[in-house]
Amino acid sequence: QVQLAESGGGLVQAGGSLRLSCAASGGTLSSYYMHWFRQAPGKEREFVAAISWGGSRTYYSDSVKGRFTISRDNAKNTVALQMSNLKPEDTAVYLCAARVTGTYSTWKGAMDYWGKGTLVTVSS
Protein backbone atom coordinates (compact mmCIF):
# COMPACT_ATOMS: atom_id res chain seq x y z
CA GLN A 1 0.00 0.00 0.00
CA VAL A 2 1.54 3.26 -1.14
CA GLN A 3 1.36 6.15 1.28
CA LEU A 4 1.82 9.73 0.12
CA ALA A 5 2.69 12.66 2.34
CA GLU A 6 2.71 16.28 1.24
CA SER A 7 4.67 19.10 2.81
CA GLY A 8 5.65 22.68 2.11
CA GLY A 9 2.34 24.48 2.38
CA GLY A 10 1.93 27.75 4.22
CA LEU A 11 0.92 31.38 4.05
CA VAL A 12 2.37 33.53 1.28
CA GLN A 13 1.60 36.93 -0.18
CA ALA A 14 0.26 37.32 -3.68
CA GLY A 15 3.10 37.22 -6.17
CA GLY A 16 5.18 34.98 -3.94
CA SER A 17 6.39 31.42 -4.37
CA LEU A 18 6.13 28.10 -2.58
CA ARG A 19 7.51 24.66 -3.23
CA LEU A 20 5.41 21.65 -2.31
CA SER A 21 6.81 18.18 -1.93
CA CYS A 22 5.21 14.74 -1.95
CA ALA A 23 7.10 11.81 -0.45
CA ALA A 24 6.10 8.19 -0.91
CA SER A 25 6.51 5.14 1.24
CA GLY A 26 5.48 1.54 0.72
CA GLY A 27 5.96 1.72 -3.02
CA THR A 28 8.04 3.04 -5.89
CA LEU A 29 6.74 6.24 -7.47
CA SER A 30 8.60 5.59 -10.71
CA SER A 31 5.83 3.12 -11.62
CA TYR A 32 3.10 5.76 -11.45
CA TYR A 33 1.96 8.83 -13.22
CA MET A 34 1.99 11.43 -10.46
CA HIS A 35 -0.50 14.26 -10.07
CA TRP A 36 -1.28 17.31 -7.99
CA PHE A 37 -4.87 18.30 -7.34
CA ARG A 38 -6.25 21.07 -5.16
CA GLN A 39 -9.45 21.72 -3.32
CA ALA A 40 -10.58 25.15 -2.22
CA PRO A 41 -13.21 25.57 0.51
CA GLY A 42 -16.65 24.76 -0.83
CA LYS A 43 -15.33 23.75 -4.24
CA GLU A 44 -14.71 20.55 -6.12
CA ARG A 45 -11.28 18.94 -6.16
CA GLU A 46 -9.57 20.03 -9.37
CA PHE A 47 -6.59 18.89 -11.40
CA VAL A 48 -3.47 21.03 -11.21
CA ALA A 49 -0.58 19.16 -12.81
CA ALA A 50 0.73 15.72 -13.76
CA ILE A 51 4.05 14.18 -14.73
CA SER A 52 4.97 11.02 -16.61
CA TRP A 53 6.93 8.10 -15.16
CA GLY A 54 10.34 9.38 -16.19
CA GLY A 55 9.45 13.05 -15.98
CA SER A 56 9.74 13.83 -19.67
CA ARG A 57 6.08 14.81 -20.07
CA THR A 58 4.20 17.28 -17.94
CA TYR A 59 0.63 18.52 -18.01
CA TYR A 60 -1.01 21.55 -16.42
CA SER A 61 -4.41 23.06 -15.98
CA ASP A 62 -4.91 26.32 -17.81
CA SER A 63 -5.19 28.20 -14.54
CA VAL A 64 -1.62 27.37 -13.45
CA LYS A 65 0.20 26.94 -16.76
CA GLY A 66 3.26 29.16 -16.88
CA ARG A 67 3.28 29.67 -13.11
CA PHE A 68 3.59 26.15 -11.67
CA THR A 69 6.16 23.48 -12.46
CA ILE A 70 5.84 19.80 -11.55
CA SER A 71 8.94 17.65 -11.24
CA ARG A 72 9.95 14.30 -9.81
CA ASP A 73 13.00 12.60 -8.39
CA ASN A 74 12.49 8.86 -8.70
CA ALA A 75 15.71 8.11 -6.86
CA LYS A 76 14.34 9.95 -3.82
CA ASN A 77 10.75 8.78 -4.39
CA THR A 78 9.46 12.33 -4.39
CA VAL A 79 7.40 14.67 -6.52
CA ALA A 80 7.47 18.44 -6.25
CA LEU A 81 5.28 21.35 -7.31
CA GLN A 82 7.04 24.69 -7.65
CA MET A 83 4.49 27.47 -7.51
CA SER A 84 5.34 31.02 -8.56
CA ASN A 85 3.41 34.26 -8.99
CA LEU A 86 0.79 32.94 -6.60
CA LYS A 87 -2.67 34.47 -6.60
CA PRO A 88 -5.35 34.53 -3.89
CA GLU A 89 -7.41 32.16 -6.03
CA ASP A 90 -4.65 29.56 -5.65
CA THR A 91 -5.62 29.21 -1.99
CA ALA A 92 -6.53 25.56 -1.41
CA VAL A 93 -5.48 22.27 0.07
CA TYR A 94 -3.03 20.71 -2.36
CA LEU A 95 -3.03 16.95 -2.67
CA CYS A 96 -0.60 14.56 -4.25
CA ALA A 97 -2.06 11.58 -6.10
CA ALA A 98 -0.76 8.53 -7.93
CA ARG A 99 -2.32 6.70 -10.83
CA VAL A 100 -1.22 3.07 -11.10
CA THR A 101 -2.37 2.23 -14.63
CA GLY A 102 -2.53 4.35 -17.73
CA THR A 103 -1.31 7.84 -18.34
CA TYR A 104 -2.33 11.08 -16.72
CA SER A 105 -5.91 12.01 -15.98
CA THR A 106 -7.61 15.21 -14.91
CA TRP A 107 -10.36 13.19 -13.23
CA LYS A 108 -10.00 12.70 -9.49
CA GLY A 109 -11.80 9.36 -9.74
CA ALA A 110 -8.94 7.92 -11.79
CA MET A 111 -6.41 8.22 -8.97
CA ASP A 112 -5.44 5.18 -6.92
CA TYR A 113 -3.57 6.74 -4.02
CA TRP A 114 -3.93 10.10 -2.30
CA GLY A 115 -2.04 12.05 0.29
CA LYS A 116 -3.84 14.00 3.00
CA GLY A 117 -2.90 17.36 1.56
CA THR A 118 -1.11 20.52 2.58
CA LEU A 119 -2.76 23.92 2.92
CA VAL A 120 -1.63 26.84 0.79
CA THR A 121 -3.00 30.26 1.66
CA VAL A 122 -2.28 33.24 -0.57
CA SER A 123 -3.04 36.65 0.89
CA SER A 124 -3.83 39.67 -1.25
Image: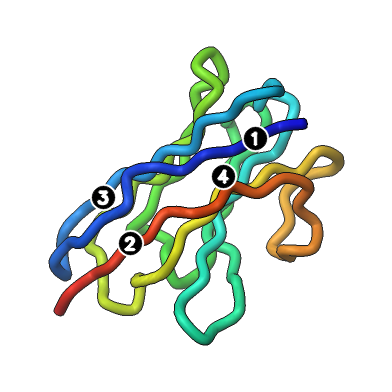
Earlier along the polypeptide chain: callout 1 or callout 4? 1
Earlier along the polypeptide chain: callout 1 or callout 2? 1
| Left/right of residue 113 with respect to residue 45 in the rendered view | right
**Residue underneath mark 4:** 58
Q: Amino acid at mark 3?
A: Leu
Residue 3 numbered mark, or none: 1
Inter-mark Cα distance, 3 to 1 = 23 Å
* Image spot of residue 39 (x, y percent): 52, 71
Are dots 2 and 3 in contact, CB under 8 Å?
A: yes
* Image spot of residue 7 (x, y percent): 39, 42
Earlier along the polypeptide chain: callout 2 or callout 3? 3
Q: Amino acid at mark 2?
A: Val
Inter-mark Cα distance, 1 to 4 = 22 Å
Q: Residues within 10 Å of mark 2 (few under 14, many from 20)?
A: many
**Residue underneath mark 2:** 120
Q: Is residue 70 or residue 117 the one in the foreground?
A: 117
Q: Amino acid at mark 1?
A: Gln
Q: How many tags in the picture?
A: 4
